Image (cartoon, coloured by chain):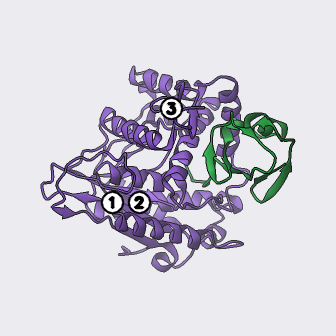
Chain colours: A purple, B green
Amino acid sequence: MRCRKCGTTAVINMRHHKLALCGEHYVEWVLAQTDRAIEKYKMFTRDERVLVAVSGGKDSLALWDVLLRLGYQADGLYIGLGINDPLPYSDASLEKTRKFLEFSIQYSVFRTGDDTQHATRITHPSTPLRSAQDASRFTPTLHVIDIAQTYGKTIPEIARAKMRGQGRPCAACGLTKRYVMNRLALDKGYAVLATGHNLDDEIAVLFQNTLRWQTGYLARQAPVLPASREGLVKKVKPFCRMYERETATYALVRGIDYIYDECPHAGGNLTNFYKTLLNQLETESPGAKLSFYLEFLRARGEGAFEQFNRVEELHACEVCGQPTSAPGRCAFCRMWDVSRVVE
Amino acid sequence: MQITFRDKQYETKPNITARDALKKIGLDPESVLVVVNGKLVTDDVVLREGDEVKLVAVVSGGRET
């Protein structure tokens, strides 16, 4: 199969777009598509500081790479969960993330002294240059929060202690990550928190919520979750229209060394099961996944779920001050038995 | 010829497309990327005897959503 733009050998055929591209033109396409989504959904601007939640996986590292290449002020946040049994999953993930950062700095992302103009200059020849000037260098920062060092236990340990999720640590993990991401983004003054959720992630959740007609969740699923209350940072998903095979392809083409393994606790989870089902549908009906998501967003935009979007009264946690639905300590402080603010 | 996926080896006959090979070994073409002799390829590529074929799982992580 040949690249539609230059006729050389294609590395990807996107049947839902009827588009095959070579590596060089595919990277260009991903950059343009991501920038378009950022603008369309009013996620952030080049004048705002962005915190990217990075896990060492393909989606988050690809997102960080794309945002840096597009000239956004994107720093990273890695949360060390302490999942190292039976395999050193967390340690390996941090290692991949650090190597990515070293590579990014080495092969340089430049920004001009003028905050309104940015330049990216990376190894790939197709990188769009935002400016020819390289007056000053933007050096991305990686924030690392080690949960065991900060709160005294790893995620598997706190999950066992509290029996959340009946033995599986996923609920404790999700609660902790959401809390830490939100708090660090606010404390460090970031305008938005960006996550690497791709279209497959989004439609797996959409499918699950539709099967159960969880209308409240449907009302709140969107590419942007605004900072609607004090204490909540704006959250965005720039890859929300990008298929998972597209982010994986981008990572491979760009030579990003990401962690291939799944989290050892992910086996048998429903999200992956729904992804498998939806991929079978996509194989038989190209574009089905994209259509499912975009038509949902259209219906949501037209107010189909507005009546279910209840605004809950929020209270400030008596320990940490973060928003919580009930008076007293928030779910995070209760789970971790936190009685004073942890710096 | 052999196809490697997640440390497992799958046997298939040569001179068929990667897409057909994936179907024969029971994998959904949407769920993997095909790397032949170190290069990422589209699944219409015909696999030849002696090719080194590796598959990369599209789904990874296990992220809480």
Give the amino acid type for the residue marked by disc 1 in the picture. Ala
Please name whichever residue, A28 or A148, is drawn nearer the observer in this view of the structure: A28
Whether residue B41 is visible here, answered yes or no, is yes
Picture residue at 70% right of the left edge, 59% below the top? A166
> Horizontal placement of A258 versus A166: left or right?
left
Measuring from the top left, give residue A39's x and y in whole percent: 30, 36
Q: In the image, which is nearer the foreground, mark 3 or mark 2?
A: 3
Say which element carries label 2: helix
Do discs 3 and 2 belong to a common subunit?
yes
Which chain is disc 1 placed on? A
Residue lying at 48% horizontally and 53% vertically, measured from the top left: A254
Question: Percent position (x, y) of residue A130?
Answer: 23, 46
Number of other residues with Cα within 10 Å of mark 3, as a class: few under 14, some 14 to 19, many 20 or more: few
Q: Which residue is mark 3?
A: A7
In the rendered structure, the answer to whether residue A140 lies left or right of residue A14 reads left
Image side of residue B16 versus residue A152, left or right: right
Q: Which mark is residue A185?
A: 1
Q: How many marks?
A: 3
Residue at 32%, 32% in the rendered image: A40
- In depth, the one of A209 and A286 nearer the eye is A286
Spot occupied by residue A291 in the image (x, y as percentages of width and height): 53, 24
Q: Earlier in the sequence, mark 3 or mark 2?
A: 3
- From the viewer's perspective, is A262 left or right of A216? right
The residue singled out by tag 2 in the image is A181
Q: Which quadrant of the view contains residue A51?
A: bottom left
Mark 2 belongs to chain: A
The kind of residue tagged 2 is Met
